[in-house]
Image (spheres, rainbow, N blue to C red):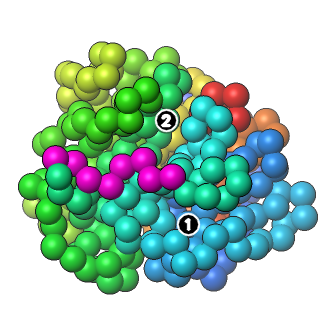
Amino acid sequence: MSCYEILDPRFADLIDPVAFLETIHTGNRWAEGPVYFADMRCLVWSDIPNDRILKWDEETGAVSLLRGHVANPNGSTRDRHGRLVTCMQGERRVVRTEWDGSITVLADAYDGRRLNSPNDVVVKSDGSIWFTDPNYGIISDYVGRKDIQEQPACHVYRIDPAAGTLTIVADDFAMPNGLAFSPDEKQLYVADSGYLTDRSAPHHVRLFDVENDRLINSRVFADISPGIPDGLRVDIAGNLWVSAWDGVQAHHPDGTLLGKIRVPEMVANVAFGGPRNNRLFITATTSVYAVFLNIRGLRYPFGF
């Protein structure tokens, strides 16, 4: 049975009708934050409640422990030098893993108060790091460490590549979550998953124009139903791939819902990978899935 639900004829051009949804690995408690390493032919992802980052070898299919006891890691990406940048919910910080395995803290506080629980992160081509900071990791001991919230709200932040300073770029979210730049980096998509903990809160993706180091002209790009939007990725044509409760949704740059990839578990995040960057990896509750598409994804960061 096909895993695809075509809602707009344009979706047929993005999928391969003979490709199918594969299970890469199972046995997680909450799989998140997939990142593909093209230079090492592997996928790494977070298993948040189990405090670990796992690694899947694309050539052998073997899964191994990359790092354990790492304070509930969530979203990750790579920086301009190929190093892993990760949101550590339990430690309330964003960190970078150096090539020697040491850890550099990039951000853990704003205005003298600890961050909430950094959730997802992207790196712009100028080296700046943009991340979201909802409070999921401090309202539960399951995916973080229950604690008091010191920040007055949940924001989107930018880390300056030269000075390392932290600034708020969006301050009106309920629960900012996944984020992704458009191909030309002139726009930034940010998911608001506030509906997860508050049924009166949003469950949509917002779109901003990027003006240097600022976000302007906020508007709702798409309401995501059922459930909430979580992780996001963009393909080379500018289509937005959104993780949702019933699978992965593909949205045209004009906001139209083109179709869905049905997944048997609640989807948390997605990442493009494979030698041609046309394989969509999907982290969904206990499992990691993959499917080959007829479109290539943007590489994050460019060149890796």
Q: Residue at x 71, y 54 (%)?
A: 100
**Does the magenta stretch mainly form a helix, a strand or a loop?**
strand
Vertical comparison of 29 with 18: above or below: below
User: Looking at the image, can residue 52 be seen?
Assistant: yes
Quadrant containing the N terminus in the rendered view: bottom right
* Secondary structure found at label 1: strand
Three-letter amino acid code of the residue under disc 1? Ser
Q: Say left or right for 213 vs 52.
A: left
Three-letter amino acid code of the residue under disc 2? Val
Quadrant containing the C terminus in the rendered view: top right
Residue 285 in the image: x percent, y percent? Answer: 51, 73
* Secondary structure found at label 2: strand
Vertical comparison of 242 with 3: above or below: above
Q: Residue at x 16, y 47 (%)?
A: 111
- Classify mark 2: residues with Cα within 10 Å, few (<14), some (14-19) or many (20+): many
Label 1 or label 2, whichever comes before in sequence order: 1
Q: Say left or right for 243 vs 43.
A: left
Say the numbered circle drawn on residue 234. Answer: none
Say the numbered circle drawn on residue 46. Answer: 1
- Classify mark 1: residues with Cα within 10 Å, few (<14), some (14-19) or many (20+): many
Residue 142 in the image: x percent, y percent? Answer: 37, 82
Indicate yes or no whether the magenta region holds residue 218.
no
Numbered range of the magenta stretch: 104-111
User: Looking at the image, can residue 120 be seen?
Assistant: no
Q: Say left or right for 172 vs 164.
A: left
Say the numbered circle drawn on residue 123. Answer: 2
